[in-house]
Image: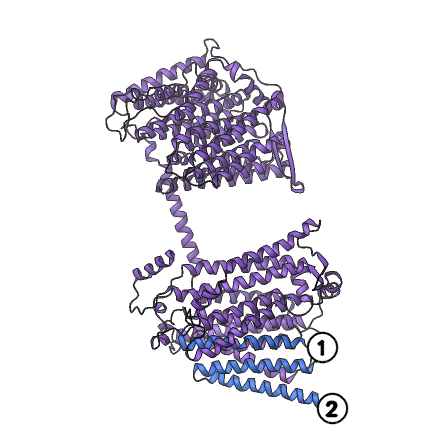
């Protein structure tokens, strides 16, 4: 239980911080600090449980049949990392409180920092591989948000995009690898996976899954060749660099390597992939770090190098190397975080990170200089500091591990070379910033920072010293606990001590120190301290990434251009054509035949009715392109005949709905028609070129074929007996089980209410999208103008806002529609309430009510209606969703599944017996939502005329359109 | 008696449908857009009456609801179209 609390607490704090006002710097810092310290205390509290190989677990079963549980698991190794994450978190929060400027929205910073802390704790404490990947991606996401914290800087946005692209692509590979592991082992539980090492290594998928896992891990830990995102990420605020990009998040990769070490390590493939990536990063990072001008750039490349060292150790397939790797993870976090903090202080107090401008700060900032010097010495591997110990272990392993002659020379050489560079860049960093001649070129004169900024770094440096002098006392037991949880109770012989006797590794350490100093002095003597990185500066991986990005985007655009057209006519042609081909192909094997059902006799009246309807439909299609209004009128005729057809064949519900839909459709289409651009001249129907004729003939044939095909299909289906007894089931159970006589409505709101819930959600979303799109709608230039008909009589034909009735011939319709209003409301509620027993229901009722509102708008005008009756369609939509959702959830409290119907009979005074049911509530939700959605679309369209000012612009210029837009935004 | 009633009702329905055919002719030949709008209005009225006749012939009240709805809102399309022809837009500010 405590485990869940550790992972959940930062997220809770994150949400709380997000709701703080943007200026609440102290409140946010206190909140973050308390959360971090609480996590730290909880982690410390759990130490007895994990000591001596113990494991703390917490499991919440979620989908046990798929092996997916919420499973937290803390062993010694996870404990060590949880301690690191929460301790660093607490120190960084303290540092950030003073680092962040009061002008920045600090609560947002702490919200994401806490979210990252939660995600990182989730990664280290998860006992389920899928769960690890989920938290892993969360760390990538929060890292993205934190790098882009100053999103007004283009560099920050670019760096954030780059880092998220690289790490999330890696995360995807990791997910695939994890799925393969789960498939092989049969479980995603870490406990099962860790003991299945032999099965995994012998499996034919081993190579593939190792590559996938390696891709995930190497991208996350910024290993060569994916290292380029880390130096770019230095645009983030320095606390983020200290916390995410040196101490914790980039360690997630090596953490997972160590975590899966028992299951995956021990093969040659592992050695070649992991150790060579590590060695390459070690050298590339150390070499590049020596030539950076940016202080944080030095630290970023040295982080790559040190992570490479850890990766290389993990790849060596030796238990002692594993011990050294875990030890170095801790050491690196302490000295690198304090170095970042020092670099941040320097930037904060002097205003620059350029080492060419900085210099001689030891005089004005002695404490910072001392902290940075000790930390840099630890990074260089100077004796009596923690970096020395783990680096010596690394040298020792590099000598021992090589089995062949080549390896036994190569590995120590790489190690030694990296050691030399590491000493050189540490020395250069400290010397250039603090100990050269004082610079007079600084944006701000440097001075010591406030105590809050120096304390976290100083504490870390003290830790470096303590571990460096008394390793066995300070870090020994913890490291042993961690190693036992990875390797089991039998640990390899290792001794944490400064003095092992006069050994080869010790000699190597001193050669590295001497070599590094010599290298730096040579650089100084040749004046090449600030020259760009030799050789490697030409191979700019970040630039290659950008180029690859552009190539991919252009290629995708070309590809979609090849297969996609923006012309609606062509799209329609493709859709209908493919549907036709698919339909014909489906009949190809069996052939078409009519069924055996007897045909109903032909009714001459109905036939005549259909002549009317068919003529209207064909006429509408024929007129659609060039006479939109005529086509719309004919569409109305066809719709009417459709309603009559439904009525004729005893489908009253459909007929009612269709009538209401017809009305709304005509009005909405007419509203849209006002804003459509005029027809295009070259598409004139009188043009009779062979090309145009051919196209029209093709379209006509296709349309006829598709229409006839659909009719044939319908005929074939309708003349055959029903295959399933679904209608019979609904007819039998509608009254008996659901208590409704109107089967259609019972199906909609009870049997299939989940479908209906989905549908009304879609309706709501569509309405909101229409509204959102129309808010920024810019009409075609020729239709911005006031319609031609209004120019002769510019006064609007609406009711004045303060007048009871309009002038002129609109008076009659105005009286009429006002009388209709309450009448229509009554009818709509009547349809709603009786829907369960007789034709009607929420959908029809809602449409009727919406139509009543529409006619008021048409006759009275927008201003007049809205000065009297202000409908808030969004509220209606929301209430509708809430009503329908409540009806569904209410069933839970009765112990029934979602959307089960609940009914209660009440006896009310005066009214009498009332049958209440959640079904009615559901239908009420549908009713309100339909009203809201229809009115929202209507109002969005109607307000277009309000937006365009009443003027007659002859040549509407681009600027004036934008002015209108801004005016609208202000309103 | 009943037979006469049935024939009368059928004949009435036929008349309404024929009226719809006549309206259809106007709808097609126009010539003005106003003629088409009036034709649609006529179609709606006759459609409503056909529904009422259906209700009478099958002695069911269900059809009256549909007729009611057309009576209430059948004119809405007409108003919208008339407004569009008159003013160039359906809803003025």
| Chain blue in the figure, letter | B
Numbered disc 2: secondary structure:
loop
| Chain purple in the figure, letter | A
Asked if one can make out residue A437 in the rendered structure from this viewpoint, the answer is yes
Q: Residue at x 48, y 10 (%)?
A: A500
Front-lying residue, A529 or A462: A462
Image location of residue A60, percent across then percent down: 65, 37
Front-lying residue, A824 or A669: A824
Numbered disc 1: secondary structure:
loop
Image location of residue A259, percent across then percent down: 56, 29
Label 1 crowd bin: few (<14), some (14–19), many (20+), radius 10 Å: few
Above or below: residue A169 compared with residue A352 = below
Above or below: residue A85 compared with residue B56 = above
Image location of residue A900, percent across then percent down: 69, 55
Query: Quarter of the image holding residue A133?
Result: top right
From mark 1 to mark 2, how far is it between C-alphas? 32 Å
**Residue under label 1:** A598
Residue found at the very far front of the displayed protein: A910
Q: Which mark is residue A253?
A: none
**Residue under label 2:** B1
Q: Is residue A772 left or right of residue A926?
A: left
């Amino acid at each position: 239980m405590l485990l869940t609390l550790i992972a959940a607490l930062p997220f809770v704090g994150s949400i709380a911080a997000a709701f703080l006002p943007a200026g609440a710097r102290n409140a946010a810092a206190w909140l973050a600090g308390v959360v971090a310290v609480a996590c730290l205390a909880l982690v410390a509290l759990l130490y007895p449980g994990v000591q001596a190989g113990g494991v703390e677990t917490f499991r919440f079963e979620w989908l046990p049949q798929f092996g997916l549980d919420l499973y937290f698991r803390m062993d010694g190794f996870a404990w060590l990392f949880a301690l690191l994450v929460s301790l660093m978190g607490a120190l960084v929060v303290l540092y950030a409180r003073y680092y962040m400027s009061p002008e920045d929205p600090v609560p947002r910073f702490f919200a994401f920092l806490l979210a990252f802390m939660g995600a990182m704790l989730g990664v280290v404490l998860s006992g389920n591989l899928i769960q690890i990947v989920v938290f892993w991606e969360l760390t990538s996401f929060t890292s993205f948000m934190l790098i882009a914290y100053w999103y007004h800087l283009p560099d920050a946005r670019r760096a954030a995009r780059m880092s998220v692209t690289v790490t999330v692509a890696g995360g995807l590979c990791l997910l695939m690898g994890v799925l393969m592991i789960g498939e092989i082992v049969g479980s995603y539980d870490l406990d099962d996976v860790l003991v299945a090492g032999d099965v995994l290594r012998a499996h034919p998928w081993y190579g593939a899954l190792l590559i996938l896992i390696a891709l995930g891990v190497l991208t996350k830990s910024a290993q060569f060749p994916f290292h380029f995102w880390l130096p770019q990420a230095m645009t983030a605020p320095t606390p983020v660099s200290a916390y995410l990009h040196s101490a914790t998040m980039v360690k997630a990769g090596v953490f997972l390597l160590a975590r899966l070490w028992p299951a995956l390590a021990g093969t040659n493939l592992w050695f070649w992939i992991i150790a060579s990536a590590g060695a390459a990063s070690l050298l590339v990072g150390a070499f590049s770090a020596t030539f950076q001008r940016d202080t944080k750039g030095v630290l970023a490349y040295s982080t790559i190098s040190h992570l490479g060292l850890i990766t290389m150790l993990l790849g060596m397939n030796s238990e002692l190397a594993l011990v050294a790797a875990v030890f170095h993870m801790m050491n690196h976090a302490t000295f690198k975080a304090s170095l970042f903090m020092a670099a941040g202080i320097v930037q904060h107090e002097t205003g620059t990170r350029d080492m060419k401008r900085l210099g001689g700060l030891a005089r004005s900032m002695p404490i910072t200089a001392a902290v940075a010097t000790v930390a840099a010495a630890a990074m260089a591997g100077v004796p009596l500091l923690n970096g020395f110990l783990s680096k010596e272990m690394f040298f020792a392993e590099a000598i021992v591990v090589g089995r062949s002659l080549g390896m036994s020379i190569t590995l120590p050489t790489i190690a030694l070379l990296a050691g030399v560079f590491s000493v050189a860049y540490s020395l250069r960093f400290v010397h250039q910033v603090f100990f050269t001649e004082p610079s007079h070129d600084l944006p701000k004169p440097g001075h010591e920072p406030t105590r809050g900024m120096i304390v976290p770094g100083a504490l870390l440096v003290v830790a470096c010293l303590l571990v460096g002098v008394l390793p066995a006392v300070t870090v020994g037991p913890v490291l042993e606990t961690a190693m036992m949880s990875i390797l089991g109770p039998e640990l390899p012989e290792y001794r944490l001590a400064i003095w092992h006797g006069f050994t080869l590794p010790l000699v190597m350490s001193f050669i590295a120190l001497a070599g590094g100093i010599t290298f730096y002095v040579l650089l100084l003597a040749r004046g090449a301290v600030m020259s760009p990185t030799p050789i490697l500066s030409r191979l700019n991986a970040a630039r290659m990434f950008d180029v690859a990005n552009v190539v991919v985007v252009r290629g995708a655009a070309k590809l979609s251009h090849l297969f996609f057209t923006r012309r609606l006519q062509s799209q329609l042609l493709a859709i209908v054509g493919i549907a036709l081909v698919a339909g014909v192909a489906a009949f190809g094997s069996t052939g078409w035949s009519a069924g055996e059902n007897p045909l109903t006799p032909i009714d001459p009246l109905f036939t005549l009715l259909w002549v009317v309807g068919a003529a209207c439909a064909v006429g509408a299609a024929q007129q659609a392109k060039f006479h939109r209004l005529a086509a719309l009128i004919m569409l109305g005729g066809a719709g009417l005949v459709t309603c009559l057809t439904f009525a004729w064949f005893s489908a009253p519900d459909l007929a009612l709905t269709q009538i209401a839909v017809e009305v709304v459709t005509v009005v909405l289409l007419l509203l849209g028609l006002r804003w459509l651009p005029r027809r295009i001249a070259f598409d004139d129907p009188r043009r009779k070129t062979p090309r145009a004729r051919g196209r029209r003939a093709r379209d006509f044939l296709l349309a006829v074929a598709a229409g006839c095909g659909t009719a044939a299909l319908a005929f074939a289906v309708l003349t055959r007996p029903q295959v399933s007894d679904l209608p019979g089931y609904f007819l039998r159970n509608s009254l008996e089980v659901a208590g409704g006589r109107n089967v259609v409505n019972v199906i909609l709101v009870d049997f299939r209410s989940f479908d209906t819930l989905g549908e009304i959600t879609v309706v709501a979303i569509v309405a909101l999208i229409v509204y959102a799109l129309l808010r920024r709608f810019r009409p075609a230039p020729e239709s911005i103008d006031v319609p031609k008909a209004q120019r002769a009589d510019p006064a609007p034909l609406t009711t004045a806002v303060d007048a009871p009735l309009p002038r002129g011939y609109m008076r009659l319709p105005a009286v009429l529609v006002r009388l209709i209003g309450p009448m229509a409301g009554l009818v709509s509620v009547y349809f709603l309430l009786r829907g369960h027993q007789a034709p009607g229901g929420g959908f029809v009722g809602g449409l009727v009510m919406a139509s009543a509102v529409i006619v008021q708008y048409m006759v009275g005008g927008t201003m007049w209606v809205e000065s009297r009756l202000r409908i808030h369609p969004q509220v209606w939509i929301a209430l509708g969703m809430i009503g329908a959702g409540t009806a569904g959830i209410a069933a839970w409290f009765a112990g029934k599944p979602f959307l089960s119907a609940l009914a209660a009979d009440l006896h009310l005074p005066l009214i009498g017996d009332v049958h209440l049911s959640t079904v009615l509530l559901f239908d009420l939700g549908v009713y309100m939502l339909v009203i809201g959605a229809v009115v929202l679309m209507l109002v969005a369209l109607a307000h277009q005329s309000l937006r365009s000012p009443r003027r007659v612009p002859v040549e509407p210029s681009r600027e004036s359109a934008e002015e209108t837009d801004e005016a609208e935004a202000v309103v | 008696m009943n037979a006469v009633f049935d024939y009368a009702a059928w004949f009435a329905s036929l008349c309404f449908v024929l009226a719809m055919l006549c309206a259809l002719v106007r709808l097609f030949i126009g010539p003005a857009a106003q003629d088409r709008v009036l034709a649609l209005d006529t179609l709606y009225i006759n459609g409503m009456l056909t529904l009422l006749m259906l209700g009478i012939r099958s002695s069911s009240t269900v059809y009256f609801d549909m007729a009611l709805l057309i009576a209430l809102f059948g004119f809405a399309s007409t108003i919208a179209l008339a407004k569009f022809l008159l003013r160039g837009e359906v809803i003025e500010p």
